[in-house]
Amino acid sequence: MIFGMTPFTFFHVLLSLIGIVSGFVVVLGFIGGKRLGCWTTVFLATTVLTSVTGFLFPVHHFMPSHAIGIISLLVLAVAIYALYVRRLAGPWRRVFVITASIAQYLNFFVLIVQLFMKVPALKVLAPTQSELPFKATQLTTLVVFALLTILAAIKFRDDAIRKA
């Protein structure tokens, strides 16, 4: 047990946290007009692995986390296609920024769900995750990510790209 988690759960959480941190670096890079190749690869790889490993937990029914995982993998497939196959040519640049930002949002969305489930102080505020503190947190997060995505899509242009 590592921090009260099985090794597999710890690995899954570690992948998720690396994906979230690297995802913020990538999105902020978009806003700064920078293409952060290594950070982007880490973000995409760890976020794909986070979604895939999420399906390997022993459960016997379809859960909301499975739906998020499926959506995340579909969005990531488009992002990976836009980056590595289409090479961000033409409209694929904006498609990449938007899909990568959505993948980052979904990863962060799940983090908030997990925090409200596992952190006692947050669990008291929203024991069923239908209470106002949880809903307000998720709504605020959605608005912030929407604004970041719009800003990133505007700033990450062909003529503004600087490799870092």
Image (tube, rainbow, N blue to C red):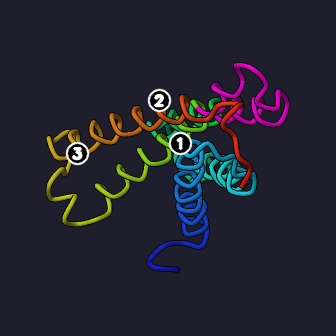
117 to 61, vertically: above or below: below
Which residue is situated farthest in the top direction here? Answer: 91
Q: Main secondary structure of the magenta part?
A: helix
Q: Report the residue marked by disc 2.
A: 150
Q: Where is residue 161 in the image (x, y as percent from the top left)?
A: 69, 40
Which residue is more in the foreground, 130 or 163?
163
Q: Circle 3 — which element? A: helix
Name, please, the residue furthest toward the front.
Answer: 159
Circle 2 residues within 10 Å: few <14, some 14–19, many ≥20 = some
Q: What residue type is labelled 1?
A: Ile
Is residue 34 magenta-colored? no
User: Disc 3 or 1, which lies upstream in sequence?
Assistant: 1
Q: Specify few, some or many for label 1: CA neighbours under 10 Å numbering under 14, 14-19, or 20 or more.
A: many
Q: Which of marks 3 and 2 is nearer the N terminus?
A: 3
Q: What residue type is labelled 2?
A: Ile
- 90 in magenta: yes
How far separated are the C-alphas under marks 3 and 2?
24 Å
Counting from the top left corner in percent of width and height, residue 164 is at: 71, 55
Circle 1 is placed at which residue position?
A: 31
Which quarter of the picture shows residue 87?
top right
Instruction: Name which residue lies at 55% across and 57% down.
Output: 16
The stretch in magenta equals 76-97
Which of the two discs, 3 and 2, sits closer to the camera? 2
Residue depicted at 52% across the width and 80% down the height? 2
Displayed quadrant of residue 100: top right
Of residues 129 and 63, the one nearer the viewer is: 129
Tell whether label 2 touches label 1 (CB within 8 Å). Answer: no
CA–CA distance in space, label 3 to label 1 = 28 Å
- Give the residue drawn at x 79%, y 25%: 89
